[in-house]
Amino acid sequence: MTESPMTARTVASAGASAGTVGEVLSGHLTAQAGAFLRALPQAVGEAGSRPGERSAAAAGAGAAGTAELLRCVRRIGGALHTFAAAFDCGWAEETRTELRWLLDLLAQEPAYLRRAVRLLAALDSLSETDPAGPGMLAGHAGAPKARALLERQLTLARTRAHTMLLQELRSSRLHALADRMTLLASDVPLLAGAAGQPAEELMPQAAAALTALTAGAHQLPLLRAATPYGGEGLHRLGASQPALPSARAAERPARAAAGDADAVVAADDAPWHRVRILAKRARYALEVCGAPSEELDALDRTLDRHQEAADAAVTVATAARTPRITPATAYVLGVVHADQRLEVEAARYAFGRQWPNLPHHGWHEWATA
Amino acid sequence: MTESPMTARTVASAGASAGTVGEVLSGHLTAQAGAFLRALPQAVGEAGSRPGERSAAAAGAGAAGTAELLRCVRRIGGALHTFAAAFDCGWAEETRTELRWLLDLLAQEPAYLRRAVRLLAALDSLSETDPAGPGMLAGHAGAPKARALLERQLTLARTRAHTMLLQELRSSRLHALADRMTLLASDVPLLAGAAGQPAEELMPQAAAALTALTAGAHQLPLLRAATPYGGEGLHRLGASQPALPSARAAERPARAAAGDADAVVAADDAPWHRVRILAKRARYALEVCGAPSEELDALDRTLDRHQEAADAAVTVATAARTPRITPATAYVLGVVHADQRLEVEAARYAFGRQWPNLPHHGWHEWATA
């Protein structure tokens, strides 16, 4: 919590207003592109240094370069999206496409690693026998088998992601993206008309990112999420959502007719995942304006947790469809699956509590400016 | 919520103080024993009228006599426990033993019925495909098999309970208990010394029942339960409990060494089940004093829900150990098991919220009287 609520005026006086649009965006993008170029060889080295290693520890140790590269990729892409008006439209679009490609490529291996850590920790906690805090599956015969199965499948997925990463790190596509970043680090290609405007002109665009986040959040069943134990993540998925546009309502019977639980759950999670992207964009936009928000950072972490629990639940459901597993293994996977959907529900509850406290309301005046 | 908090003084002026201990206890027990005697033939008739029927509907329909009999048995037993000082010790003890026997006998069949309703509803909700609110197992292949398995096992258990009930309803033990109730309905065997005292003498005994409830509740991890999604029902069972007496601490390693998840979970639930009994006793004691508490009734219902979810979870865990079930069936049972433990956690959360609002504090002055 900040001591006094952040308003657009205080932001304007503290941050972005101290120059022109060109100065603010150049300063931000030059710094991020420079960090990108420094992190790139480190990330390549990290990926190359663990060719045959499959242990979680090896993949996790010394991945600081990859993490930093991901950080820069997200911020540059976010700025190019939110402040698109200041750039050549075609160039910004192309650059964002290439950044998204690198993001997808880089993010996979750490995501599988985090998912393995999350799921194995959940399984260990559920089957814990320590009298100081045993789990509901304490000493269950299926737990070691389920653990081995999850570990094997996630290691395999991570190895595949790693192999693909190694291939692409030598590709001409990456070299071309690095060239783009070299250009950005020295000379940000701003539109002449936009660059000279006062930095306050960035405000309506940052406000638009917040407005998009607000609109996305209002599509969520927030009231329901704010009531704990509503069964939101397990039961009655998609219920109590706001009235849907007719196009989406028409999709639903088809979805249910397929009888595919994964599709049903994915449709329930989708609006939350969209809000996660909107929250990140809003977060990076505020950083550009020199007004980072701790509350928004916390909200983003909650939505990351939501995404990771939802992805982990899908992994467990997939593992449970492995042929020839024992009923005991399947049973334990069922418990872990429900536990991860409970984590999804818990993250939604946390979001429902955090959202009303977000001090973004002062920004709305900029949206109409 | 009551408009103004209930205090012992207002209770004393409103209810029990309007006579002697003998008048209040006789009035209460005569009424309850009379209701017992009216409900008994109806309950016997209900049990006898469904000899071969196994459907849930048949067992549920027209069980009003059994429900009324259970109501009276609980209230008479509670009064004999809480106000034991007014009765011949041996007679009250014997009567309570016989009432407990009938309670266990009568309660089983409806409990299995409620458990079947609860579990099948949970399973149906989890595997619901209706687009208005599908579940995380929507259309899962294991759901119909898991449903059939649970229904079969619970019907079998209910049929066994019914057979035992039919046998015992013809036993001399029941006839002897009915004779005791006939005596109670006409002439309550009060100790001469106690009967003539002013009714206010009942207050310290009712207060003692509330004090026992408070002491029991203070053994519960209430702070933890009041934080939603603490993983209380699934993970870290028995953690963050208050310091245990050394005798109980010594039990724990043995429990964990057995590696039996059911035992671990049962040990975690036990203090909550004890508090449920204490809440019922306190509730019935307040009724005797003419001061029923809606808040205490609500608390009792929450603890009933806790007990029923915990029992249902055990049933699912047992069903999952059935030999030769398919992995898909076992998987669905794992999800349902976790879902019921989540219900346990939700009930604890509800208790943690209700407990501080219980307007029983005015009663403490009677405990020291």
Image (cartoon, coloured by chain):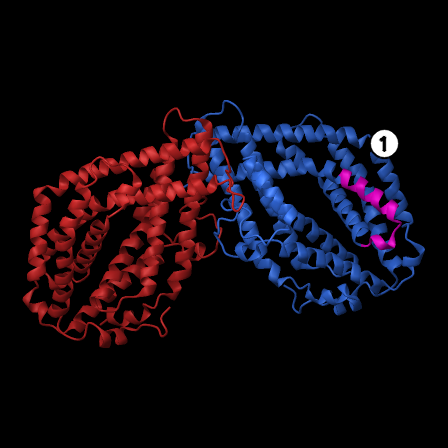
Chain colours: A blue, B red
Where residue A115 sits: x, y (%)?
A: 60, 38
Query: Based on the displayed image, in which of its 4 quarters is residue A254 positioned?
Result: top right
Residue closer to the observer: B46 or A355: B46
Q: Which stretch is magenta?
A: A83-102
**Residue A267 appears at what percent x and percent y?**
60, 43
The quadrant of the rendering that contains the C terminus of chain B is bottom left
Q: Amino acid at mark 1?
A: Ser
Residue at figure coordinates x 28%, y 70% from the top left = B363
Q: In front here: A255 or B142? A: A255
Answer left or right for B100 relative to B331: left
Does the magenta-highlighted stretch encompass residue A94? yes
Q: Is residue A73 above or below residue A291?
A: above
Residue lying at the far top of the rendered structure: A324
Q: Please report the residue visible at 63 percent of the width from the left and 36 percent of the height from the top.
A: A113
Q: Is residue B266 visible?
A: no
Disc 1: which chain?
A
Please tell me how many numbered marks the rendered image carries.
Answer: 1
Q: Quadrant of the N terminus of chain B?
A: bottom left
Q: Quadrant of residue B44?
A: top left
Q: Picture quarter containing residue A262?
A: top right
Asked whether B240 or A294 is in front, the reply is A294
Is residue A292 toward the left or the right of residue A55 in the image?
Answer: right
- Whether residue B68 is visible, yes or no, is yes
Mark 1: which secondary structure? helix
Residue at 12% over, 62% down: B30
Image spot of residue B242 (x, y percent) = 38, 54
**Disc 1 target residue:** A172
B188 is higher (above) or lower (below) than B146: below
The reply to whether the magenta stretch includes residue A294 is no
Q: Percent x, y for residue B360? A: 32, 67
What secondary structure do most residues of the magenta stretch adopt? helix
